[in-house]
Amino acid sequence: MTITYPFSAVVGLADLKLALLLNAVSPRVGGVLVRGEKGTAKSTIVRALAAQLPEVQVVAGCRFACDPAAPDLGCPDGPHEPGEQRAVRPAALVELPVGASEDRLVGSLDVERALTEGVKAFEPGLLAAAHRGVLYVDEVNLLHDHLVDLLLDAAALGTCYVERESVSVRHAARFLLVGTMNPEEGELRPQLLDRFGLTVEVRASRDPQERAEVIRRRLAFDADPEAFADRWRPAESELAGRIARARARLPEVRLPDARLRQISTVCAAFEVDGLRADLVTANAAIAHAAWHGRDRVTTEDVRAAARLALPHRRRRDPFDAPGLDEDLLDRLLDETSGDDDDEPPPGGGADPEISGPEPDAGSGADGDGGWQDPAAGTPRDERTAEREVRNGTDRPEPDAGAVEPDTGTGQPDPGAGQVAAMAAPYRVPRLEVPGVGEGAAGRRSRSRTPRGRAAGSRQPEGRLRDLHLTATLLAAAPHQRQRGRTGAGLRLRPEDLREVVREGREGNLVLFVVDASGSMAARRRMTAVKTAVLSLLLDAYQRRDKVGLVTFRGDSAGVTLPPTSSVEAGAARLRSLPTGGRTPLAAGLVTAAEVLRVERLRDPARRPLLVLVTDGRATAGGDVDRAADLLRGTASVVVDCEGGPVRLGLAVRLAARLGAALLPLDSLGELGSVVRDYRKVG
Ligand SMILES: [Zn+2]
């Protein structure tokens, strides 16, 4: 069963609302990461919650939204006196755009004025604007790592620090952090995943009835928008009131020892790393109890918290499907609910799982609060939804991108072709694009980057942020007498300032072009090819590349995987890749050139690396040399798949034509430790 929001049918909506509410009740829960495909109304739902958060009282005129009852002692606009004028405003909803600069996020400090005039000029950023409200980051997985770090640091500390060259500013920044991501477009690093308190999976409903209901509503809206809006207007004050009551109750909620042991048992059984999972689960369980008007955490609260706090913290490798084994969770909770020394909760039934309405659950105060669907008749308790989830009726289907255990059989392709199995991936040498790029941070090729080791100095192009002290002094020194310096003080002018040029590593676009034809003949050869590509894919994941996959067989070439950051998707496509037929090598090269052309337009800073996996033979399609010439100038590697005692050396010839490095397939796994420059190999 799906709960339908007016214009969308979304599975997992009940979880999302609960996760948002728990965060609204307790800031210690640590935010929500919403995982799901596009078109699931994630942002609409978050906006709806923000609109229903209780209003905040602020010191009038303070750009940092100080609470008059407890102003931030270090507020840059302070100090605030007790009698200062107040204002009431809605809780903020601030959106952080993926392309935002660091200054935009944390605020900007004018280092030039600080150094040359001695003035501390600070312009607040989005973190200040989000204080006491919601900070929403759509597609947080596409956000620059450095920004994600700053964001999560601020979220964890409740404070924003800005420091430039020993001039520093700090201010309070407590906000409900909500991030969304589409896992198909790339995962977050596990360390960052762990720092979101809760995660929720949402996806569009595939149920025809629910989809029809959405269309029906859309038609009703088009016919009479005002009547429709009236019918759907959320019970704002009701929900805001309930959040406020739960917040007030929060400090009173007790976590009995038995429940704490239960949390530890569950976290240990799910093999989560570290103790953060235990802490988040405990805080979320406490918030859940407060939300339901209880002053003591019950097993039901632990269950609700664990379902949201643990899925993204299980130890797993990048190719595991997300989610939590709910049967195991139920079993663990059942086994550990026996030592309930202090349950049942006051006012509740004997078994919280089947008890009636919550003590505080007045008429409209059900779990869905203001999101109640008036057309649905009886109010839905969110626990009903949870139970349905546990019964499996609402369990997410395996994701399209999820990887099934490899049985080696795969999908038979009626068109011809077999599916070769893959062996375990191995470590491959680092292939590198020559030169120095300016692409997104990663671990492959050299690049200019704000993070990284100092490699020189230059005059700043925009605002100075990374002072190169020695270079600045050297620039100022020759002019001291002429500027009238007589005593000890150095006379600095803006034009003296130098910033550090840093060099680090970037991620690249690794485009695999793989011969899947019958010229690979024996399935054993194809297994070796697939395993090699899988190993290179894993390497690309670790180096934070985008990957794409072009394959050719039979009469044509195709883009099997359009460039994406999702290595899972790549592995899945590779696994089910059929083999056989003729070898249209030229078509593969032409298709690769077209993919690279489009990607260059889309993301010009990301430099491509072409990895062509072939034995160099062509038995169909156009002229290979002409096609290869389309790719000249692209950094490329030919993985030579030719084996056996008699070799034609076609791949060698092709590599020369492309200006590519050559790596024999069988050597890939034997190159041992990371090779700095692949051009020395092969
Ligand atoms: Zn203030």
Image (tube, helix red, strand yellow):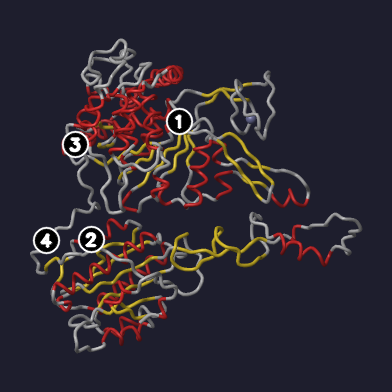
Disc 4 within 8 angstroms of ligand 1 (CB): no
Q: Locate residue 32, reporting x and y percent.
A: 39, 37
Residue type at numbered disc 3? Ala
Helix, strand or loop status at disc 4: loop
Q: Earlier in the sequence, mark 4 or mark 1?
A: 1
85 displayed left or right of 420: right
The residue that disc 4 covers is 409
Quadrant where ligand 1 appears: top right
Residue 254 location (% of width, % of height): 40, 19
> How far separated are the C-alphas under marks 2 and 1?
40 Å
Query: Mark 2–mark 3 contact, CB under 8 Å?
Result: no
Residue receiving disc 2: 573
Q: Amino acid at mark 4?
A: Thr
Query: Of discs 2 and 3, which sits in the foreground?
Result: 2
Numbered disc in front, either 2 or 1: 1
Relative to 118, say whether 538 is above or below. Answer: below
Gap in angstroms between the C-alphas marked 3 and 1: 40 Å
Which residue bears the numbered disc 1?
28
Q: Secondary structure at mark 1?
A: helix
Instruction: Check contact, mark 3 vs mark 1: CB within 8 A.
Output: no
Q: Between 496 and 575, which is closer to the camera in this rendering?
A: 575
Nearest to viewer (mark 2 / mark 4): 4
In the picture, the disc for residue 212 is 3
Work out how far the residue at label 4 is from the one at label 1, CA to CA, in angstroms: 48 Å
Give the left or right position of residue 219, taking residue 507 as reference. left
Residue 676 vs 41, above or below: the answer is below
What residue is drawn where x is 66% and y is 60%? Answer: 499
Residue type pointed to by label 2: Arg
The crowding category of the residue bearing disc 2, from other C-alpha atoms within 10 Å (few below 14, some 14 to 19, many at least 20), is: some
